[in-house]
Amino acid sequence: MTAMNRPNQPDRRHPNRRTALCLLGGLGIGTTAFQRALAQEVADGREVTPDMVKNAEWVAGITLTEEQREEAVQSLQGVLRKREQLRQATVDYDTLPALRFDPEMFDPDVQRRTQQAPSWLRTDTVPESGDVAADASGDSEGDLLFASVRQLGAALRAGRTTSVQLATLCLERLKKLDPILKCVVTLTEDLAYQQAECADTELAAGHDRGPLHGIPWGAKDLIAVAGYPTTWGAPQFREQVLPATATVANRLEAAGAVLVAKLSLGALAMGDRWFGGQTRNPWNPEQGSSGSSAGSAAAVAAGAVPFAIGSETLGSIVSPSRRCGTAGLRPTFGRVSRRGCMALSWSMDKLGPLTRYVDDCGLVFDAIHGADFGDPVSVDRWFDWPMNADLSALRVGSVDGAAKSAAEQLMLDALAELGANIVSISLPSELPEWAISLMLDAEAATVFHDLTAADQTEGLNRWPSVFRKLHFLSAVDYLHAARLRTRLMQQMTDLFRNVDLYVGGDDLGICNLTGHPTVVMPVMMSEGDHPQPVCATMTGRLHDEATLLAVGCAVEKKLNVAGNAPTL
C-alpha cells in the first residue's frame, strides 16, 4: 500500500486539558464538574484513583466494590502505561491490523460453489438488456451522454466517434454541471487525453483491450491516482498527493478505460458534504445526492461519465444510487482490491461500480475483480460476463414482516412474470445489527486517531463525536460485537439454503456486516414536481454477482426505465 503522511504528532504523555475535556464531554461521563476536574488531572499527568474508577464505572457497564476499585487502579495504571507505549509508536493510514474478516468462514459450500457458473446461468454474447440498448443509440452528443458502455463501444469501433471526443464531451459536461452539482474534486484532463489518445491509436491498429477500451470514467476521491490529489473529501487532506495509483484504477487503465475526474465524497466517506460543499442530485438539485459515493452517483446520473467507481462501508453505493436513480453493484467483501484506497473499516470497506445500465456494472466488475497481494482479504472467485439467467430455475425471496416499497413490489411482480419462483423468507431479526456496526466506528476511530488526538477535526461532518466516543469502547465490547457478527453470518448462510437471491428487506446493516453482494437498480419513475427513477435492490449469495446482474438485466429489459435523463 502507498505511504500516507500523518499530521503533526501530539505529546500523548500529557494531553492538554481541552483535548481531555472534549473526549470526556463527547460521551458525557459524570457531571460537568467531574469532567472538568478529571480533565485537569489527566492533563497534569496525575495517577488514576479509585474515585476516578467509580465515576467511570458506568461506561464499562459494571459496578465494583471498594476493594475491587483499588485492584482496578493498579491494573489500570499498568494498562495506561502500555497504552501510552502503543500510542508513541506511529503507523501510516493504510497500515492494516493483524486481524482478517472472512465472509466465507461460515459457508461450507462457498469454495466449491464459486469455482464455476451456477446451473441457471448461460454465457451469451449480449445480456437481455444489452441488445435492446445497443439498438437505441444515436451518435449525437445527447445520445452519447446517456449511452450505455456497449453503445459507446460500438460507436468507437465503427469510427463514428473517438475516445478523445468522448473524453472531451465528459470533461465539458463536468465543467458545465459542477457549479450546480458540486460533484468534481479534481479534473484529470492531462491524464484523460493521454489515455484517450492511446486508446484511439490502439483501436485503430486493431489492438482491442475489451468493452471498456476508450470509455471515460470517474473515480471516487478516496482512490489514489499518482500525480493528482486524493483528498478523501476532508480539508485535512486537501493537498494530499499519494505516490502510487490504486489497484482498481490500474486495472481499469489496463482495460483501456479513460479517467476524466476524481469525484466527490462526503468527508472521510460520510454523507454528501465535503470541503467543496454538498453534492446534489441531478434530478432535483435542491436535494443532496446522499453519500458517501455522492459524486460518483451524481456524475453518472447527470450523463457526465458513463460509469464511476464508488465504495461502500455501510450504504455508500446503495444509498446514492437510490437517491440519484443509477444502477450500482456492492460486491461481496473481498472481491475488489482496496489497495491505494482510503481505509475506513478494514472489515467492511468494499469497492464497486455505479452505472446507468445493469449490464455496464457487469462489464466494469469483470475488469476490476480479483485477488491482489496489496489487499490480503481480496480473493479470486468465478465470474464471467455477459451471462443470461434461466429465471424458472431460481428461488427469489420476498421478505416477510417488512414493508415493501412500490419499487420492490414491482420488481417482485416482474420476476414472477419472468418465471422466477417467489419464496417467502424472514431476515435475521433478533440480533442488533446497528449496535454490531459499532465495529465500523471503532475501526474508523482507530484509523483517524491522530486527528482526534491533535484536535484536527473541523469539517468532518459527524465524525468528530463518533471518534471521541469510540475511544471509550473497550476491546471486550468490540470482540463481543464480532461474536454477534459471527452469529449473523451463520444465520445468513442458513437463509441462502432456501433462496438464491431476495428482493429488498431493509438489509443494509445486515449485509454490510456479513459481506453479501447487492445490486441496486431503477425500476419505475416517480411522480410529482421532480420525477426521477426509483430503485429497488436484490441481494445474493457470497460471490454470486453474476446471478444478481443477469437477473437485473432481465428485469431492466422488462421494465424499461434505465436510460432516462434528468433535465439540467
Image (cartoon, rainbow, N blue to C red):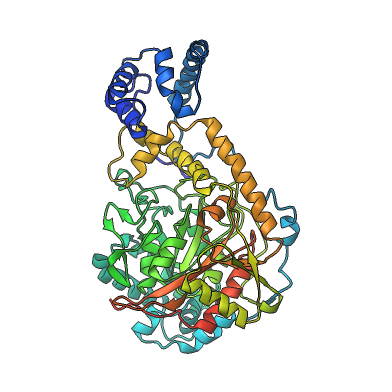
Instruction: Give the x, y percent position of residue 340.
Output: 47, 49
Give me the residue at 43% from left, 70% from top: 326
Instruction: Give the x, y percent position of residue 451.
Output: 35, 36
The quadrant holding residue 14 is top left
Instruction: Give the x, y percent position of residue 423.
Output: 66, 70
Give me the residue at 68% from left, 55% from top: 493
Q: Left of 177 or right of it: where is 145? A: right
Q: Residue furthest left?
A: 179
Q: Left of 456 or right of it: where is 514? A: right
The quadrant holding residue 492 is bottom right
Give me the residue at 61% from left, 40% from top: 483
> Which quadrant of the figure contains the C terminus?
bottom left
Above or below, 232 relative to 159 = above
So how many labels did they put on this image? 0
Q: Is residue 409 visible?
A: yes
Q: Residue furthest front?
A: 401
Q: Left of 276 or right of it: where is 197? A: right
Above or below, 259 relative to 93 = below
Instruction: Please state which of residues 155 and 456 is positioned toward the viewer in this rendering.
Output: 456
Instruction: Give the x, y percent position of residue 136.
Output: 46, 88
Instruction: Please state which of residues 444 and 410 is positioned toward the viewer in this rendering.
Output: 410
Q: Is residue 100 visible?
A: no
Instruction: Please state which of residues 497 and 99 is positioned toward the viewer in this rendering.
Output: 497
